[in-house]
Image (cartoon, grey):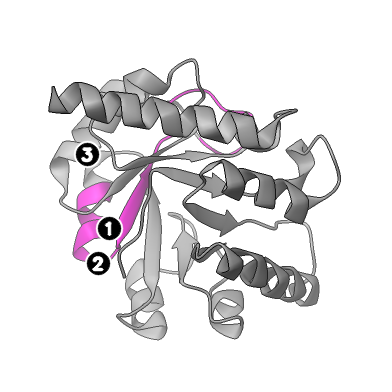
Amino acid sequence: MHLDYSLYLVTDRSVLKCGDLFGAVEEALQGGVSLVQLREKEVSSRDFYNIALRMKELLNAYNTPLIINDRLDIALAVNAAGLHIGQEDIPLEVARRIMGPQRIIGYSVSNVEQAISGEKQGADYLGAGPVFLTASKSDAGEPIGVDGLRLIRESVKVPVVAIGGVGLDNLEQVWETGVSGVSVISAILGSQEIGTTARKFIVSRRKHEKGILR
């Protein structure tokens, strides 16, 4: 499955200015978000399942794939496009065996060794970071910076997505590393104008691409 990683939204209801997760995600989709990861840490499995079903229905209307954070069982139950796991989750090779070759598996990494291992074990893309300081994940670890991000991107052939503290103020630095996209939580969902903010990310990407082509 070909995915557009350019603007990868990860959900977090705690940063929303309003209480409507689905309305916020729809605004982001209208602004150009190309991929959505559903992240739910504080709900029951039944609630996560129901939220995932509704989110998948919304994303289908925009022809946008749904990735489930951490929960392989939920990803399978709702027939999501894929799963994203970290270093402390179910082993990547086990997830790949259960998910099969057709579904997408993303893997969080913070150094070159993890990136190379993730690629060998079957990850379709890598979420590399945190690139900058971030308040969205309390366990994110020390920032790797744009130099660390570049090293990871150069060490593998699979797409690399920058995660952690990425915003409009540092976006150009991130694009310069050659990553396939950026993963964003609060920079979009915490905005008063979600759709407008998402469009600014897309405009930045296009300007960078035009600069490369010139």
Give the residue at mark 1. Answer: 118
Q: CA distance from mark 3 to mark 1?
A: 13 Å
> Residue 68: x, y in percent?
55, 65
Residue 53: image quadrant is: bottom right
Give the residue at mark 2. Answer: 121
Please give the range of residues in magenta. 115-140
Q: Is residue 12 left or right of residue 178?
A: right
Residue 174: image quadrant is: top left
Residue 196: image quadrant is: top right
Whether label 2 touches label 1, CB < 8 Å:
yes
> Residue 32: x, y in percent?
51, 44
Check disc 1: other Cα within 10 Å, few if <14, some if 14-19, many if 20+: many
What secondary structure is found at the residue carrying circle 3?
Answer: helix
Q: Is residue 91 above or below residue 118?
A: below
Main SS category, magenta section: loop
Q: Is residue 131 magenta?
A: yes
User: For this rendering, which residue is in front, 113 or 209?
Assistant: 209
Q: Is residue 211 magenta?
A: no
Residue at the far top: name it: 169
| Amino acid type, callout 2 | Gln
Give the residue at mark 3. Answer: 153
**Of the two numbered discs 3 and 2 in the rendering, the one whose residue sits closer to the viewer:** 3
| Amino acid type, callout 3 | Arg
> Residue 64: x, y in percent?
50, 62
User: For this rendering, which residue is in front, 62 or 45?
Assistant: 62
User: What is the quadrant of the N terminus in the image?
Assistant: bottom left
Q: Is residue 165 visible?
A: no
Residue drawn at (71%, 30%), measured in percent from left and top?
Answer: 193
Residue drawn at (43%, 54%), measured in percent from left and top?
Answer: 87
What secondary structure is found at the residue carrying circle 2?
Answer: loop
